[in-house]
Image (tube, rainbow, N blue to C red):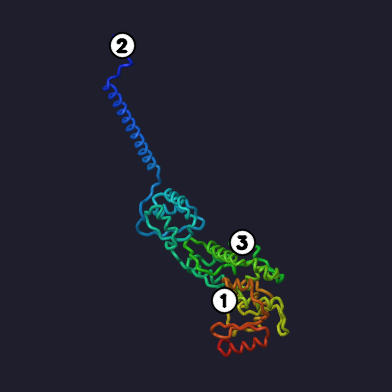
């Protein structure tokens, strides 16, 4: 081997010292580690900073289910933001914004009903919303209006329970359209008598949860709304139209239902009592009956009450007075056809009976015992026999 050959090996052909290669690898590892640590620190710091920033802008909220009790009233038509303000002002939630966030996050929030609720002070917004969605949290006033009540009786009951003056109910009742009764309801087809617009018949009998925040108008509107819901449920208007082929209007069927509610003692007799009324108005003649007159004592009594006088038992009524057309506008002993308005507020069985009564040629009926058994007759002779039975049982 020549010197030139040896010189060549000291160049690119001669192996590099191993110690030099180890030192470079170590430096690269350290550098990479420093980069990773530094980047990790930046990421962790970023998340920490983002969390702090998020906390800074988060809505203030209490933790837990709160303490004590507080009654909160949610008015009809209140939005989530309205409820948030109410709860904040009552000390239930720490901020309205927290409740709005809980409201938006809960798909059932729109199911919150108007009324008075028992909540707790300093609750989390989520807990407050849960109570508003719970029926057990609602304060129940339980004002029950029974079937057949007259409007003026209803005003007295509501006034006693809520403190709203009776005169406020009478004033609110004047504007039937504002209460939700469309003018299409006030049509009569059986005669040419002028319709008297009245809330009578449209105040549905039920149990209501009225609050101290309710007005006379809001209470009557809710009762009318309940009536309309039931009428829709049973297809009242449509069934009346199909049953009577346009001869009877829904208002007239409602009027008939109010009288059947007053006359029938059992739900199963509501339809047959209505059929008697229709037969008398539409003129099914038996030779011993002059058609057109309903001859219901309950209508005369309603007129007496409307005039500020006392109602009488049938046995105490004077037939000469009953047949005097000037004595009482609601006397169906004197005036043919239907009375000027319904005489009370019927329930669902009476409405169903009036809109689609059973077929029959009955013209008379009478309760024959103290259990409320009612017998129906097509002729006066048959009816007189039923009256004797009622008298024997101490009913008449």
Residue drawn 31% across and 9% down?
A: 4
The relative height of residue 20 versus residue 207 in the rendered view (above or below) is: above
**How far separated are the C-alphas under marks 1 and 3?**
31 Å
Q: Looking at the image, can residue 111 be seen?
A: yes
Q: Earlier in the sequence, mark 1 or mark 3?
A: 3
**How far separated are the C-alphas under marks 2 and 3?**
119 Å
The mark lying in front, picked from 1 and 3, is 1
Question: Quadrant of the image for the C terminus?
Answer: bottom right
Could you classify mark 1 by the number of other residues whose Cα lies within 10 Å: few (under 14), some (14-19), or many (20 or more)?
some
Question: Quadrant of the image for the N terminus?
Answer: top left
The relative height of residue 67 versus residue 243 in the rendered view (above or below) is: above
Residue drawn 33% across and 32% down?
A: 38
Residue corresponding to mark 2: 5
Residue drawn 67% across and 83% down?
A: 378
Quadrant of the rendered image containing residue 54: top left
Q: Earlier in the sequence, mark 1 or mark 2?
A: 2
> From the viewer's perspective, is 175 left or right of 194?
left
The residue lying toward the viewer, choosing from 120 and 271, is 271
The relative height of residue 298 versus residue 88 in the rendered view (above or below) is: below
Instruction: Give the image location of residue 139, x and y in percent.
Output: 43, 63
- What label sits on residue 267 in the rendered view? 1
- What label sits on residue 148 in the rendered view? none
> Extreme top residue here?
3
Dots 1 and 3: beta carbons under 8 Å? no
Could you classify mark 3 by the number of other residues whose Cα lies within 10 Å: few (under 14), some (14-19), or many (20 or more)?
few
- Helix, strand or loop at disc 3? loop
């Amino acid at each position: 081997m020549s010197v030139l050959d040896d010189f060549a090996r000291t160049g690119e052909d001669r192996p590099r010292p191993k110690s030099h290669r180890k030192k470079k690898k170590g430096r690269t590892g350290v550098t990479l580690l420093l980069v990773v640590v530094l980047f990790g620190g930046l990421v962790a710091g970023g998340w920490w900073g983002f969390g702090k920033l998020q906390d800074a802008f988060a809505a203030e909220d209490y933790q837990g289910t709160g303490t004590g009790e507080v009654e909160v009233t949610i008015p009809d038509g209140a939005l989530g933001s309205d409820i948030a303000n109410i709860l904040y002002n009552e000390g239930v939630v720490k901020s309205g914004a927290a409740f709005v966030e809980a409201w938006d996050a809960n798909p059932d929030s729109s199911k919150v009903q108007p009324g008075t609720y028992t909540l707790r002070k300093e609750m989390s917004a989520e807990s407050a919303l849960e109570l508003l969605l719970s029926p057990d949290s609602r304060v129940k006033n339980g004002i029950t209006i029974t079937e057949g009540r007259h409007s003026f009786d209803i005003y007295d009951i509501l006034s006693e329970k809520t403190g709203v003056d009776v005169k406020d109910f009478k004033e609110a009742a004047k504007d039937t359209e504002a209460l939700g009764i469309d003018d299409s309801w006030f049509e009569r087809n059986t005669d040419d008598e002028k319709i008297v617009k009245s809330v009578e018949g449209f105040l549905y009998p039920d149990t209501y949860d009225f609050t101290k925040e309710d007005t006379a108008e809001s209470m009557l509107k809710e009762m009318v709304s309940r009536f309309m819901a039931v009428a829709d449920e049973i297809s009242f208007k449509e069934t009346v139209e199909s049953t009577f082929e346009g001869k009877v209007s829904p208002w007239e069927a409602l009027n008939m239902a109010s009288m059947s509610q007053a006359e029938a003692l059992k739900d199963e007799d509501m339809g047959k009592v209505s059929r008697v009324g229709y037969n008398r108005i539409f003129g099914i003649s038996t030779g011993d009956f002059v058609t057109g007159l309903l001859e219901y004592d309950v209508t005369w009594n309603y007129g007496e009450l409307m005039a500020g006088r006392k109602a009488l038992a049938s046995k105490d009524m004077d037939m000469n007075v009953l047949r005097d057309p000037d004595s009482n506008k609601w006397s169906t002993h004197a005036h043919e056809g239907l009375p000027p308005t319904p005489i009370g507020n019927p329930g669902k069985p009476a409405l169903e009976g009036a809109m689609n009564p059973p077929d029959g040629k009955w013209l008379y009926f009478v309760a024959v015992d103290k259990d409320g058994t009612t017998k129906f007759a097509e002729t006066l002779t048959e009816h007189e026999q039923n009256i004797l039975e009622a008298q024997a049982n101490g009913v008449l």
